[in-house]
Every structure is written in structure tokens, then in C-alpha cells.
Amino acid sequence: MGDWVGCGPSRPGRARMRSEVADNHPGRRRPPWRFSSTALAGFALLDELGASPAHIVGFSDGGEYALVMAELQPAAVRSIVAWGAMGMLEAPPGMVEALGNVVDNPIPPLQEFSNYLKSAYGEENARAMTRSWAKAFGEIIDGGGDISRKRAGEIACPALLITGEQDFIAPPTAVSELAGAMQKAEFIEAKGATHMVHHDSPDWLAKMIVDWLAKR
């Protein structure tokens, strides 16, 4: 329900990237396979494009991937902009099931989210995506919920973390705490917005990202 928004080179030229994972030291906790394997695909893409180190911009799980990438291979990530990401997953009782049923039987707080997903992806695709996402969500929570939060202090690149005031997946308090644990992170709360800040406040978000990246 999140995705990659984009990545771009920080400067002309080409820097070869290692294909191995940079945190394979004994005793180091690795992110859930879903995130570490996708991060490796991100490194391969940057290498193919000659775009490393890059500014990584992502929403929801796309933002989680960006954080994992900065932990696994810091030299490949120049900066991060993420919204709707908090470095871990947690949910109140019943929320995982509610997310899995959000297309066909949304609970009242998720009705607008359901409408958006069906409009953006089509009902069949939205159903398959949310059921798969809810399954992965549940598995990560059952495994302790951590994605990158425990190693957040290792993330040294500049980062802008944004979340909606009404985001129930990545609440402002949790995202603010993540920013505080990172070395060079800023936190901004999008007033009145839900998890989908890009849908609720598109012009505000675009300007915020462009202005912030222009200084990096």
C-alpha cells in the first residue's frame, strides 16, 4: 500500500556498489527478509543507473525500504524523504484483519482509504494487494515488529520524516521518536492528513520535498 516514489543521483558520475549485504557481521540483527531483499533490488537498480549515492524518496513501505537501505549500505544513500514510515510495525487488536478486508468490508475509519485504493488500483488489484500486505504485516508484527527502528541510530544521512496528523499506521508520536533516534533526521507532521499525505495534501507535500532536497 506504499511503494517506491523515486530515487535520483546526487551527482554526475558512476560509483560501483557492492552486491553483498553490508551488515553481515555475526550477531547483527537483519531486517525482515521482505525488506532486506527488496533493499538489495534497490541497490542493484541504483548500480545499473549509475545513481549512487542517491536521494531516496518513499511512501509507507517504500519509506521503510529507504530506511533499511541506509542501514545496510550507508554509502549508497545520500538522503531520505519518507512519509508514513516509522521503522517498525504495530497495530491494535483487529487492525491486521481490518486491513485485509479493507476492500470488501472496510471499518468506518478505513472507508476513505478503501475508496482510494479501489479508485487508484482497481478493485481486484486492490483486494489482492491489501490481503498480501496484511499477511506480511501480521507476520512482521508476530516476529516483534521491528524493521529498522532498533538500528535507527546508525542512519547517518540527512532525512526528512513526514506523517499525517491522523495517520493510524505510522502515528506522529512514533515517527517523531524514530526521527529523534536517527543522527540527522527532521520530523514534520502534516496537519489534517491521514496515512496518504500525498493524497490529502499533494501540493504541500510536493513543495516540502522539493524545497528540502534542494538544500541537500
Image (cartoon, rainbow, N blue to C red):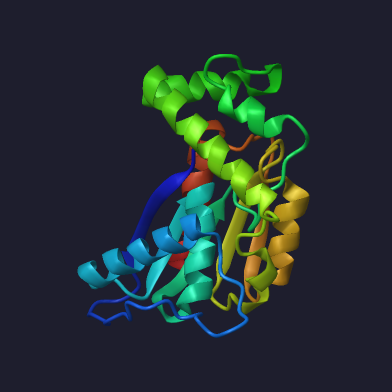
From the top left corner, tell me how far across and down residue 164 is, in percent.
Answer: 65, 41
From the top left corner, tell me how far across and down residue 27 is, in percent.
Answer: 62, 81
On the rendered structure, is 120 left or right of 107? Answer: left
Q: Nearer the viewer, residue 180 or 125?
A: 125
| Residue at position x 54%, y 64% in the image | 67
On the rendered structure, is 40 left or right of 83? Answer: left
Q: Is residue 76 above or below residue 134?
A: below
Q: Nearer the viewer, residue 190 or 161?
A: 161
| Residue at position x 54%, y 44% in the image | 136
| Residue at position x 32%, y 77% in the image | 19
Q: Which of the 4 image quarters holds residue 14?
A: bottom left
Q: Count the numbered circles shown.
A: 0
Q: Nearer the viewer, residue 58 or 126?
A: 126
| Residue at position x 60%, y 46% in the image | 139
Q: Is residue 170 above or below residue 113?
A: below
From the top left corner, tell me how far across and down residue 8 is, in percent.
Answer: 33, 63
Residue at the bottom extreme, as displayed: 25
On the rendered structure, is 190 left or right of 103? Answer: right
On the rendered structure, is 152 left or right of 35? Answer: right
Q: Is residue 139 above or below residue 92?
A: below
**Residue 216 visible in the picture:** no
From the top left corner, tell me how far across and down residue 146 is, in percent.
Answer: 66, 59
Residue at the top extreme, as displayed: 105
**Residue 200 visible in the picture:** yes
